[in-house]
Amino acid sequence: MKILVTGFNPFGKEPINPAIEAVKLLPESINNAHIVKLEIPTEFNKCVAVVKKEVELQQPDYVINIGQAGGRAAITPERVAINLDDGRIPDNAGYQPHNQTIQEAGPTAYFTQLPLQAMVDAIHQVGLPAEISNTAGTYVCNHIFYQMQYLREHEFPQIKAGFIHIPFLPAQVINRFNAPSLSLADSVRGLTAALRAITEADN
């Protein structure tokens, strides 16, 4: 089995993004599944092409996109991607869509193929907070989540895909009063547990 795991680069005014930092530290293999790691740009019009190229090259069984969810206290596997781009802030290319459909011919939403409850349970078992999320937002995180589902439907039916949000790192909340965070080591541990649950559910 091969799992492609992507992480976004820093965006907004943040000097760091826990998503790519955690992805970099994932094991090379989890439960005999080969983990392929990829940094992707926080850009609506570029991130999909980067992931698609790697899917064509690697031919993975799973594509798991990881993103930062500032304000959340738990690791949150996402249930649904919606056909809407609406940027609260511009992306790293300065593009800020408002109320735009991602795919005119696409459905309103897609559900993930990932075993969400098993993933949450696995994260809990290593002593970390986790819950299923029913909204991936309308920024680049939801965009890549939706587009991977669309590509799965039309070009890569052999893959299963999904998205996981992780909290801020402690260094990111120093000046954010009462904002939750999770250490990088714990994010890596939680993601590793979630990926292990995926491999176990696949067997």
Image: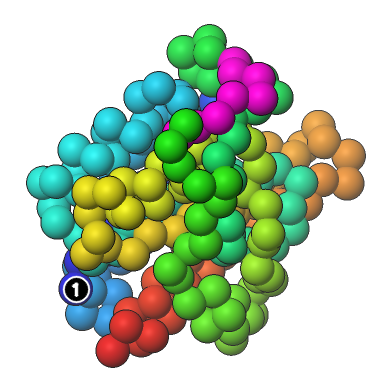
**From this viewpoint, which residue is outermost toward the front?**
105
Give left or right: position of 152 versus 71.
Answer: left
Give left or right: position of 7 versus 137.
Answer: left
The picture places residue 8, in percent across and down from the top left corner, at 44, 38
Q: Which residue is at a point 65% across and 20% down the rendered structure image?
A: 98
Image quadrant in which you'd find residue 158 = bottom left
Q: Does the magenta stretch include residue 27?
A: no
Name the magenta segment's main secondary structure.
loop
Instruction: Tell which of 65 and 83 is nearer to you.
Output: 83
Give left or right: position of 96 versus 191.
Answer: right
Query: Would residue 164 be visible to someone looking at this image?
Result: no
Q: Does the magenta stretch include residue 100?
A: yes
Q: Mark 1 = which residue?
A: 1
The span picked out in magenta is 96-103
Q: What element carries label 1?
A: loop
Please determine whether, in this image, residue 83 is positioned above or below residue 45. Answer: below
